[in-house]
Structures are given as C-alpha cells and as structure tokens.
Image (tube, rainbow, N blue to C red):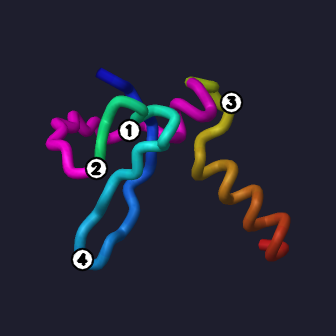
Amino acid sequence: MIEVKTRLKRWGNSLGLVIPKSKNEKMREGEEVIAIVIKKQNVLKETFGTFKFKKTVQQMMKEIDKELYNE
C-alpha cells in the first residue's frame, strides 16, 4: 500500500489522479488498483491554524472600505 497526496486533473469530461513514478515502482500499466479518496477539508484552517482575531470579519471589512473608499 502507498499513500500519495495529489491533485485531481481534468481529463476530458472526467477527473483523474496522477501517481508519481517514485511512488508506483511496483505497479504496472493496466493493473487494477483500489483508490481511497478523501477530500481535504478546511484548507484555510489547516493553512492558517485556529488564530483568533480581535475583530470580526465585518469590522475588518468596514475598516478596509473606509481606508480604500474614504467612506
């Protein structure tokens, strides 16, 4: 069994996975495989963690609008 992180790619009207050669040394073209696909969730949370802001998003947006548009 191997574990690979990869991105889906469009192939015509379908989506496909590419397994890097370094990960598939024992597999051969035409062999049947079973893939367990887990969609990555909470990408922003995983990237930025659980940082807590002192202001709400609405408050920050109002400040940005005020600065950009002199409102």
Q: Which mark is residue 13?
A: 4
How far apart, in angstroms, are the residues tagged by discs 4 and 2?
Answer: 22 Å
Q: What element carries label 3?
A: loop
Disc 2 target residue: 29
The amino acid type found where label 1 is placed reads Lys
Q: What element carries label 1?
A: loop
How far apart, in angstroms, are the residues tagged by discs 3 and 1?
Answer: 28 Å
Q: Which residue is drawn at 66% across and 37% down?
A: 55
Nearer the N terminus, badge 3 or badge 2?
A: 2
Q: Is residue 34 magenta?
A: yes
Q: How crowded is mark 2: few (under 14 residues within 10 Å), some or many (20 or more)?
A: few
How far apart, in angstroms, are the residues tagged by discs 3 and 2?
Answer: 54 Å
Instruction: Give 64 or 39, whichever is nearer the viewer.
Output: 39
The amino acid type found where label 4 is placed reads Asn
What segment carries the magenta color?
Answer: 29-49
Disc 1 target residue: 40
Asked whether disc 3 touches disc 1, contact meaning CB atoms under 8 Å apart, the reply is no
Disc 3 target residue: 54
Q: In which quarter of the image is the N terminus?
A: top left
Place of residue 48 in the rendered image (x, y in percent of width and height, measured from the top left): 62, 32
